[in-house]
């Protein structure tokens, strides 16, 4: 029921991004005809270093703990378009840490490695294309759950778990800022260190094993709109249902990214993510981050 309510909320949100009143992000730069590249390849990217800090002196009576957090992000896209063919590639890397006063250990607050690729050939029928979809997702470093007494439990490692998805399907692509890929025959491979399956199942991998192969259906959707001048809103949604086991338990991964460009090299960002995976906690995982920092366009 919780998943159903979440999807009911999410569908109108995606529809809103395509309403007539919404503004699609466009590049309005005027280019001299002789400067236009004839290459079918285009690319863009950004590197950002974001941080937030809160400090209290010893006489502060309102409560609170001094802390410092730093997050680094790298985003890069390289796309191909020629005649009926398209090939879109996207790489996202992120890592962040925080230091809380009076605690010896630095804690990880963000950790992501994700690469996705969609190749498509137009069907000759509007915005629809035959497609092939690939996605890889993992993380760089160890992750821990921390107890109230300061103890910690190892819950993940670099590239453990790691998820691979691949499958044929159909791509509906209105423009560079709105597309949906439907892959009804998707293979998913999960790899995990044997340390995590030594005593129990973990991340969808059976006890004592290091991998699991699933077969199911996936939907990957993305939209980007301009809310105001220099403010963009991006929605990313990934759904996966395993035909072989618990087909009704759909895995959900939804991310909202809002970026505000302050000037050429400064930006503020908000990130909100919701994950549901029955093979991990069986509950909704929620992450939210607001930060200000340096940004460099590639």
Image (tube, helix red, strand yellow):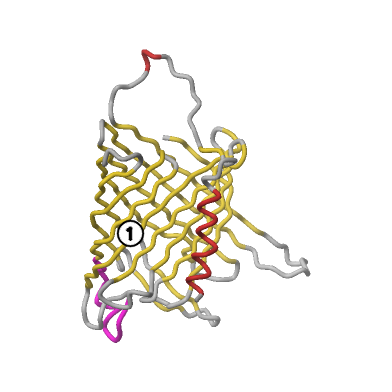
Q: Secondary structure at mark 1?
A: strand
Which residue is depicted at the point 29% across and 34% down? 81
Q: Is residue 268 left or right of residue 64?
A: left
Residue 55 in the image: x percent, y percent?
A: 67, 59
The residue nearer to you, when weighing 255 against 198, is 255
**Is 81 inside the magenta-drawn segment?**
no
Residue placed under numbered mark 1 in the picture? 137
From this view, report whether residue 93 is shown above or below residue 110. Answer: above
From this view, report whether residue 140 is shown above or below residue 178. Answer: below
Residue 194 in the image: x percent, y percent?
A: 24, 77
Q: Is residue 163 left or right of residue 50?
A: left
User: What stretch of residues is rendered in magenta?
Assistant: 189-202
Q: Residues within 10 Å of mark 1 (few under 14, many from 20)?
A: some
The residue nearer to you, when weighing 168 against 50, is 168
The residue nearer to you, when weighing 285 against 154, is 285
Residue lying at the far front in this picture: please name it.
Answer: 125
Q: Total label count?
A: 1
Q: Is residue 114 left or right of residue 47?
A: left
Query: Residue 157, located in which quarter of the rendered image?
Result: bottom left
The residue nearer to you, when weighing 234 against 151, is 234
Residue 87 in the image: x percent, y percent?
A: 28, 41
In the rendered image, the quadrant that contains the C terminus is: top left
Which residue is depicted at the point 78% across and 69% down? 61
**Is 191 inside the magenta-drawn segment?**
yes
Which residue is depicted at the point 34% across and 52% down? 181
């Amino acid at each position: 029921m919780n998943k159903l309510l979440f999807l009911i909320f999410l569908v109108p949100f995606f529809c809103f991004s395509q309403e007539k009143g919404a503004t699609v992000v466009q590049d309005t730069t005027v280019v001299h005809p002789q400067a236009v590249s004839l290459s079918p390849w285009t690319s863009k990217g950004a590197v950002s270093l974001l941080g937030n800090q809160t400090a209290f002196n010893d006489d502060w009576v309102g409560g609170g703990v001094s802390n410092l957090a730093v997050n680094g992000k790298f985003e890069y896209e390289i796309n191909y378009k020629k005649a009926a063919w398209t090939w879109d590639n996207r790489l996202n890397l992120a890592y962040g840490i925080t230091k809380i006063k009076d605690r010896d250990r630095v804690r990880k607050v963000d950790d992501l490695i994700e690469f996705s690729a969609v190749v498509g050939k137009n069907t000759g029928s509007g915005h629809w294309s035959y497609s092939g979809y690939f996605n890889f997702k993992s993380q760089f470093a160890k992750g821990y759950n921390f107890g109230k007494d300061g103890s910690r439990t190892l819950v993940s490692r670099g590239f453990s778990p790691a998820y691979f998805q691949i499958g044929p399907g159909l791509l509906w692509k209105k423009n560079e800022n709105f597309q949906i890929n439907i892959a009804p025959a998707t293979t998913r491979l999960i790899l995990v260190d044997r340390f995590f399956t030594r005593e129990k199942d973990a991340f969808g991998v059976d006890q004592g094993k290091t991998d699991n192969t699933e077969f199911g259906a996936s939907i990957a959707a993305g939209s980007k709109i301009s809310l105001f001048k220099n403010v963009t809103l991006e929605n990313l949604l990934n759904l996966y249902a395993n035909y072989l086991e618990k087909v009704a338990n759909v895995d959900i991964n939804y991310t909202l990214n809002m970026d505000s460009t302050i000037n050429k090299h400064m930006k503020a960002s908000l990130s909100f993510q919701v994950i549901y995976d029955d093979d991990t906690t069986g509950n909704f995982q929620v992450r939210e981050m607001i930060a200000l920092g340096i940004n460099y366009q590639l």
